[in-house]
Amino acid sequence: MKLESLCLHAGYSPENGQPRVLPIAQSTTFKYASTAEVAKLFDLAEAGFFYTRLGNPTVDAVEQKIAALEGGVGALCTSSGQAASMLAVLNLAQSGEHLVSASSIYGGTFNLFAVTLKKLGIEVTFVDQTASDEELEKAFRPNTRAVFGETLTNPSMDVLDIARFARLAHRHRLPLIVDNTFATPWLLRPLEHGADIVVHSATKFMGGHGAALGGVIVDGGRFDWAASGKFPQFSEPDPSYHGLSFTQAAGPAAFAARARAILLRDMGATLAPLHAFLFLQGLETLSLRVERHVRNALAVVDFLRGHPRVERVNHPCLPESPSHALYKKYFPHGGGSIFSFEVKGGAAEARSCIDRLRIFS
Ligand code: PLP
């Protein structure tokens, strides 16, 4: 596909690259002029689309937008946030290898790491993200392949010290993956603090309307895969992709290129074009919604904190929060609309509070 027709297909002006309209490319396949054209696409010698499992113009538009929001060199959408975390780690670790992960993470990710990856032969050591460097060092092994954490943890709302975790990971020539779902790039851009890969459940704030499930992996483009010596899958010829080396073919975007060419190809956890369109619409209002979410949450946190039947409120904006110092460092514009609170009494009082809660939706 020629660049001009590609631009038109994706709704961009070939003159200035600006979006004209964004059609939903509701198509599994595309039309090609010649075998040579398809060969170039297949060899990653030219950007383009040859099958929607691997790439699609509407999905590409959302990938480019999220990569720009996070400050990455490329991105890859997935069918859910869960798939984004799974593909991000499977791009780095295989059976017999090991990951270090913060223990304070979304329950679904914890389960993926503790149970499913274990069955696939990948072991995960969970660490307390507030532990000292000396303690954290003990979790690393010669076969460790990545470090994982959440910028704002689900549901405890702890703040990850991204710069410290990045330093630790890099000391071992390993990348840091962070899940930035709760913060969104509007509040925090983890790549600017040393993270290498960012994942999201786009299902939440990016979509914004509860209408579509999806995820995204953003490639920071700065990790030197060849120099690390631990990731031959990026620098060595890949026999399942006719001997292509991803660092040679895709340069700094080797991580995203391999996740797409190998993992989306083989596992098929692809975002549908229609859902990509819904995410693009959601992203239009990300800044407005997140700003309002944060403001509303802080007002409710304030109300609950002064309530006589509330024992404790968990949000890092509160001075009593163990994450307050990190919150001030990483969230100058406020952080996160999620919080939890404990009612006075026990399980019966908690249940009664939830059952009597009226929410508007
Ligand atoms: N990461 C975080 C922080 C989440 O909260 C969730 C879902 O709640 C996920 C990942 C998984 O995302 P999805 O539900 O889109 O698969």
Image (cartoon, rainbow, N blue to C red):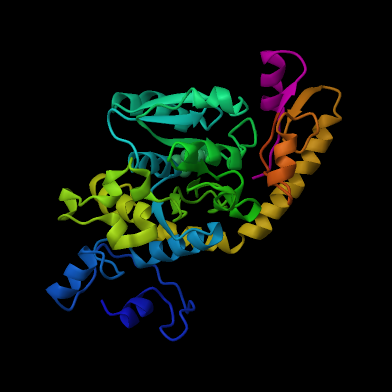
Location of the C terminus by quadrant is: top right
Residue sitting at the far left: 35
In the rendered structure, which segment of residues is drawn in magenta?
Answer: 341-361
- Say which quarter of the image contains residue 273: bottom left
Height in image: 64 above or below 307? below
Reply yes or no: does residue 123 show up in magenta.
no
- Say which quarter of the image contains residue 347: top right
Drawn side of residue 54 relative to residue 290, left or right = left
Instruction: Please state which of residues 163 and 218 is positioned toward the viewer in this rendering.
Output: 163
- Residue 142 image position (x, y, % from top left): 36, 29
Drawn side of residue 258 relative to residue 127, left or right = left
Reply yes or no: does residue 358 show up in magenta.
yes
The residue at 39%/64% (across/down) is 60
Label count reads 0
- Residue 264 image position (x, y, % from top left): 29, 50
Height in image: 192 above or below 319? below
Location of the N terminus by quadrant is: bottom left
Instruction: Please state which of residues 218 and 299 is positioned toward the viewer in this rendering.
Output: 218
- Residue 149 image position (x, y, % from top left): 52, 36
The residue at 48%/30% (across/down) is 101
